[in-house]
Amino acid sequence: MRVSLFVILVFLFTQVSFTKATPSISINFDAVSSDDKEAKNQTQFEGSAPIEVTFNMEIYDADEWTYDFEWRFCHEGGSLEEPYMIRYEENPVVTFSQAGTDSIALYIRFVKGEEEVLFKRNYWTPGKPLTIKASESSLTFPNAFSPNNDGRNDTYKPKAFKSIVEFNAKIYNRWGQKLYEWDDVSSNGWDGTFHGADVKQGTYFVYVRARGADGREFIIKKDVNLLRNYNEYETGASK
């Protein structure tokens, strides 16, 4: 039996018209850590705390649906079923200051009439939540610096640091007079001046108190050699 082309086209149009689009979503985040690492549209990140993270979600095929959602957060050893924090903004901004790994998932429910679509932690591929890992803390200071404006080692500041969330450092001269103090571990530190004037070449003293994201306490007391006439070359020679 022959079927007219018109009938076939009507059948195909009807099938397409009544195909139901199921809502879907994708999630990721943008992150900036205190050691200046940056990430855009990622699902995993590791850096030095504090880490500021902006979470993003995209919703597809949900024009006729209403929805409600919550971002869930758990720290390592915890459960997304019993999160330590829930956020209800579409794009929450969260600062992570505790060392270790946090898992984050978006729980969302779509409703249209009697229909319901529920997404929980395992809806994405490969079934893993977003993860933010804050490094264990560390803090080291050099023994010397050379403020001679050669672009190398011109200020006294931490040689290396990770996940430092509280910080204070003071510079003293040999008579115990405080010359400089700063509270931002990522700043440029001391430039070898006092009240705008260069101090003499010689030995000074630094006292540091700091705390890491993992609770570790740092107390550093050491001499600081200010070498104003020092020049460093590729050979390592100086004059």
Image (cartoon, helix red, strand yellow):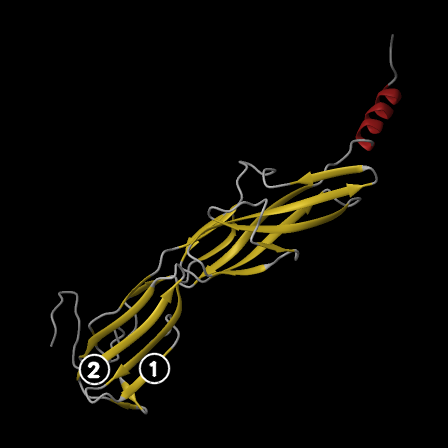
Q: Quadrant of the C terminus?
A: bottom left
Which mark, by number, is residue 181? 1
Name the residue rendered at 60%, 58% in the picture.
92
Q: Quadrant of the N terminus?
A: top right
Residue 128 image position (x, y, % from top left): 52, 40
Residue 213 falls in which quadrant of the image?
bottom left
| Crowd class of label 1 (few under 14; some 14 to 19; many from 20; radius 10 Å) | some
Which mark, by number, is residue 204? 2
For the residue marked with disc 2, what is the amino acid?
Tyr
Can residue 153 be spotted in the picture? yes
For the residue marked with disc 1, what is the amino acid?
Glu
Can residue 190 be spotted in the picture? no
- Tell me if 56 is positioned left or right of 176 in this view: right
Q: Is residue 230 above or below residue 70?
A: below
Marks 1 and 2: CB-CB under 8 Å? no
The answer to which of 61 and 17 lies nearer the viewer is 61
Residue at the limit of the structure toward the top, as seen here: 1
Name the residue rendered at 69%, 39% in the picture.
118
Labels 1 and 2: the sequence-earlier one: 1
Which mark, by number, is residue 132? none
Name the residue rendered at 77%, 45% in the picture.
63
- Tell me if 228 is positioned left or right of 178 in this view: left
Residue 225 image position (x, y, % from top left): 18, 78
